[in-house]
Image: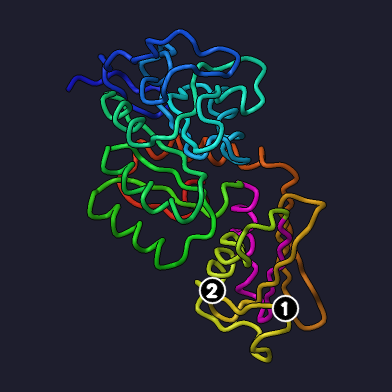
């Protein structure tokens, strides 16, 4: 296959297939009069280098943010929006955009994946749905050759391992991250550097969403990152009230908060001193630079990646 010159670090075919669009012209004001299966995806932006993106969970809090971010990002094309809620409505209007995107929300993921799989460009699925559905979503996406970027929280260690094994067998990339905050990834890097010099380490997190399992995947990821140094922390404490020991006895405390979207503070204690670093997310839009980074990077990957910090 002939390949075009590189643009933005991504190679694309010279003659990608023509993008289909809805034969029904009755998608207006966010309403769709036809059955969802009759709706094909978006009209092409005309950019043969643009990465086709599907958002699964498009009507949810994070999904709406992803729809907005992808629609405004250069080099990306929103071609599908999937959710069991608000079916038939325009994804752009559901996300709060002033103008409709003419991408209706439909409730049949395999149908969307089939359409994107016919495109010669490397498609990406961004999944912010629910833990119970994420496993099947990833497998379906990979089966159709569409690379998944997964931000769904609440997956168990066994489920993450199963996804990794499935990707390895399929030789297909998948990026799964408990948090897509670049700020939090930077915090974790700083924490692993500081942890080498301290024996007592505690992770405190505040979460706004009371449906999120605690401790969150982000806090557990931080604890395991610190544990990679191979030393036992908090040697005099097995576990404190309200705290959970993770990895090499890194103590994690989780609580709910109405003030911030998410906050993580790491406290290091040494002889005669206390050192702490923290990161605060005030709005879900803070995760979007990391999501866009993952979308752009995954098209050139062939392996499973856990954690956005691996891409920075």
| Disc 2, SS | helix
Examine the rendering and report whether any part of residue 100 can be seen.
yes
Residue at 46% from the left image edge and 47% from the top image edge: 150
224 falls in the magenta region:
no
Left or right of 89 in this view: 208:
right
Q: Which residue is mark 2?
A: 227
How far across and how far down the image is residue 39, in percent? 39, 20
Foreground residue among 19 and 218: 19
Quadrant for the N terminus in the image = top left
Q: Which residue is mark 1?
A: 242
Between the C-alphas of marks 2 and 1, the distance is 20 Å
Quarter of the rendering containing residue 41: top left
How far across and how far down the image is residue 223, in percent? 58, 69
- Magenta segment range? 182-207
First-in-chain label (2 vs 1): 2
How far across and how far down the image is residue 225, in percent? 54, 66
Left or right of 162 in this view: 271:
right
């Amino acid at each position: 296959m002939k390949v075009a010159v590189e643009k933005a670090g991504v190679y694309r075919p010279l003659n990608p297939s023509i993008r289909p669009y809805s034969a029904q012209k009755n998608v207006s004001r966010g309403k769709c009069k036809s059955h969802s299966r009759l709706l094909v995806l978006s009209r092409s932006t005309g950019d043969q280098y643009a990465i086709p993106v599907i958002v699964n969970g498009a009507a949810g809090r994070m999904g709406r943010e992803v729809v907005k971010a992808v629609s405004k990002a250069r080099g990306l094309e929103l071609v599908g929006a999937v959710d069991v809620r608000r079916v038939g409505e325009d994804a752009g209007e559901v996300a709060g955009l002033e103008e409709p995107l003419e991408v209706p929300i439909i409730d049949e993921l395999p149908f969307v994946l089939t359409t994107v799989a016919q495109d010669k460009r490397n498609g990406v699925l961004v999944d912010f749905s629910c833990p119970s559905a994420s496993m099947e979503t990833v497998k379906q996406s990979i089966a159709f050759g569409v690379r998944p970027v997964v931000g769904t929280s609440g997956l168990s260690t066994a489920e993450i391992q199963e996804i990794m094994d499935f990707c390895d067998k399929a030789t297909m990339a998948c990026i799964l991250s408990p948090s897509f905050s670049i700020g939090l990834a930077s915090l974790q890097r700083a924490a692993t550097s500081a942890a080498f010099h301290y024996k007592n380490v505690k992770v405190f997190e505040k979460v706004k969403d009371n449906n999120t399992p605690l401790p969150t995947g982000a806090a557990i990821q931080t604890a395991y990152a610190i544990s990679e140094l191979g030393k036992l922390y908090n040697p005099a404490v097995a576990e404190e009230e309200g705290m959970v020991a993770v990895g090499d006895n890194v103590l994690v405390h989780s609580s709910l908060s109405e003030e911030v979207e998410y906050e993580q503070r790491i406290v290091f204690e040494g002889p005669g001193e206390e050192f702490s670093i923290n990161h605060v997310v005030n709005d879900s839009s803070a995760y979007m630079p990391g999501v866009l980074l993952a979308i752009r990077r995954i098209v050139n990957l062939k392996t499973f990646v856990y954690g956005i910090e691996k891409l920075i």
